[in-house]
Amino acid sequence: EKYVKASRENSFVVGVHSDTYGHIVGGVESLDESNKFFIPVGMIGRVKTKIIGSISIGDEVVLSSIPGVGRKFNPDIDRERDIIGFVVETNLSEEIKLVNMKI
């Protein structure tokens, strides 16, 4: 199996790699979360998500061109079916940051 970070070029999303997760994917023998062979994945509910650009409560999130980073949905260039969740907090920084998102 191979796990890759989702991006606009590779848009198959199973969940969000996050430190606030409900499931660990993959692995070898140990459930030790520090084990590099496990990938913590949030699949439902609220998760901390990497977002680039200004974003406000209720904004929908789609994949950015940066692997593993989301951005605000833009109806002029994005499709509604590409929405992976919506944010539940406001963060006006234009940089990449962690934001609470509901999947």
Image (cartoon, rainbow, N blue to C red):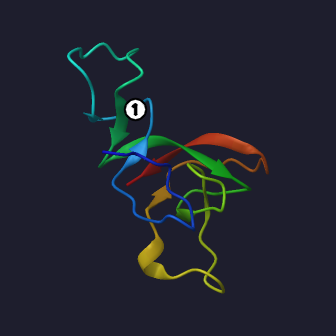
- Give whichever of 25, 55 is nearer the camera: 25
Left or right: where 54 falls relative to 41: right
User: How many labels were placed on the picture?
Assistant: 1
Q: Amino acid at mark 1?
A: Thr
- Give whichever of 18, 102 is nearer the camera: 18
Quarter holding the C terminus? bottom left
Residue 97 image-quadrant placement = top right
Give above or below for 7 relative to 89.
below
Q: Residue at x 41, y 52 (%)?
A: 102
Query: In the image, residue 20 lies at what x, y percent?
Result: 40, 32
Left or right: where 31 falls relative to 101: left
Left or right: where 26 falls relative to 101: left
Query: In the image, residue 47 lies at what x, y percent?
Result: 42, 41
Give above or below for 55 relative to 48.
below
Instruction: Report which residue position mark 1 lands on.
Output: 20
Q: Residue at x 50, y 56 (%)?
A: 6
Per the image, label 1 sits on a secondary structure element best described as loop
Q: Outermost residue, front direction?
A: 1
Q: Residue at x 59, y 52 (%)?
A: 67
Q: Outermost residue, right direction?
A: 94
Query: In the image, residue 16 lies at what x, y percent?
Result: 42, 46
Query: In the image, residue 72 lies at what x, y percent?
Result: 62, 64
Q: Residue at x 30, y 13 (%)?
A: 32
Give above or below for 57 relative to 35.
below
- Give whichever of 62, 57 is nearer the camera: 62
Label 1 Cα neighbours within 10 Å, binned few <14 / some 14-19 / many ≥20: some
